Structure formats: C-alpha cells, structure tokens
C-alpha cells in the first residue's frame, strides 16, 4: 500500500511540474522562462562590463561567463521546446482575432530563433578565434567552424547585429505582455508569474 501511495504521489508531483493548471503555466515552463531571463541579463551584463575594463584577467573571466550564460540560454531553450512539444502550453489569452494570434505566433517563433542562433553564433565566434568552448568548463562542444580570423570578424559582426534584433524582440515581448495585462486584462502575464493571481 505504501509503495502504491508513494508512486501516486510521485506521479502527481511530476504531473504538477510539467502540466499547466488553469490559472498559470506549468512549474517547469515558468522555471525555464525565468532561468532564460536571468541568463540573458547576466550574459549581457558580462559582455558590456568587459568592454569598459582593461584588466586582461578579468576580461577573460567575463568573456567566459558571457559564453556560459549564453549556453545556459541555449540549454533552457531546448528544454522549453521539448516541454512545449511534449506537453503543450496552456493559453491564457482568451479569444483573440486571428491576425493577433498569427502575430503572437510569429513573434514567438522569431524570439525562439534568435535565442537559438545567438549562443550558436557565440560558440562559432570563439571557435573561429581558435578558442575551444566547454560547457561549465567540462563538456567540450563540437566544432561548428574552423579557426579563421576573417570568419571570426564576420561572425562577430553578425553576433552583434543579432543581439540588437534580440533586444527588439524582447522589448516587443515585454510590451505585449504588459498590453495583455493592462489593456485586455487577461491571464497572459499572470500565467507566467506564480505569485500573481489571474484577473477576472
């Protein structure tokens, strides 16, 4: 009996972790979303801080942290996509016109694409500079490009341009969430914030 009850408790815990309740997204979705937000901010801070200092050792540390946070973004994205394809996502937006639904889908796809491309480009830039990249200093990543100084410069420029595009997409994403919360008064923003109740 105890074994059966334990199995049921474990099954219920897993269900709560990956399946969304009616008023918010699943715990896994929320966790991965905010891990991504933190990792993106941390990566940006490390990258910008590095540009304003001259201490070589600290610059090297900040660059490595920039890479590692970028890889965390990539890992979190892969887990989010797997979770979304495997378990789906609850919709808290209510009824919206078809044009708005397509616009939301397109912006999400663009955001996912940028979040996928940015870390991969970063890895490629490092490898083009003949700098091997290891996740958490342990797991070596496969070579995406050969060592080539000219290619490194081209990829670096592309990485910076994509960073600006990602900033625009994130700004649009935040603005849309605020619009849903303030104007439409639906559960889109509250659904991703565990401590905020959905407006009725």
Image (spheres, helix red, strand yellow):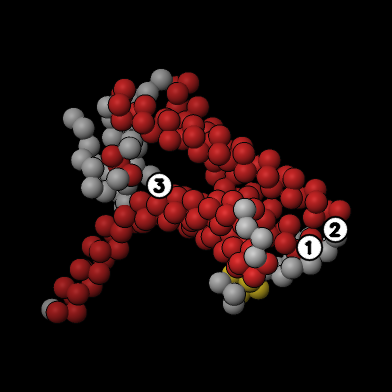
Kindly check if marks 1 and 2 are in contact, taking CB atoms under 8 A apart as contact.
Answer: yes
Where residue 42 sits: x, y (%)? 50, 55
Q: Name the residue carrying label 1.
A: 129
Give the residue furthest to the front: 54
Q: Residues within 10 Å of mark 1 (few under 14, many from 20)?
A: some
Answer left or right for 125 relative to 107: right
Give the residue furthest to the bottom: 2
Q: Name the residue carrying label 3.
A: 88
**Viewer-closest of 36 and 90:** 36
Of the image marks 1 and 2, the number of the one nearer the N terminus:
1
Where residue 184 sits: x, y (%)? 31, 24
Mark 2 lies on a secondary structure that is helix
Q: Name the residue carrying label 2.
A: 149
3D distance between C-alphas at marks 1 and 3: 40 Å
Mark 1 lies on a secondary structure that is loop
Front position among marks 2 and 3: 2
Front position among marks 1 and 3: 1
């Amino acid at each position: 009996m105890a074994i059966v009850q334990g199995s049921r408790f474990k099954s219920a815990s897993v269900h709560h972790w990956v399946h969304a309740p009616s008023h918010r997204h699943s715990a896994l979705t929320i966790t991965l979303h905010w891990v991504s937000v933190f990792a993106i901010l941390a990566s940006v801070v490390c990258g910008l801080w590095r540009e304003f200092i001259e201490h070589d050792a600290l610059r090297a540390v900040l660059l490595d942290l920039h890479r590692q946070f970028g890889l965390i973004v990539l890992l979190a994205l892969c887990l989010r996509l797997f979770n979304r394809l495997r378990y789906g996502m609850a919709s808290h937006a209510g009824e919206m016109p078809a044009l708005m639904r397509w616009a939301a889908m397109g912006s999400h796809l663009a955001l996912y694409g940028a979040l996928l491309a940015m870390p991969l480009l970063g890895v490629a830039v490092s490898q083009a500079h003949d700098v091997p990249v290891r996740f958490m200093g342990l797991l070596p990543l496969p070579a995406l490009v050969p060592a080539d100084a000219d290619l490194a410069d081209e990829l670096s420029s592309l990485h910076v341009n994509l960073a600006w595009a990602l900033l625009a997409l994130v700004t649009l994403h935040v603005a849309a969430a605020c619009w849903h919360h303030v104007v439409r008064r639906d559960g889109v923003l509250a659904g991703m914030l565990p401590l905020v109740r959905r407006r009725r």
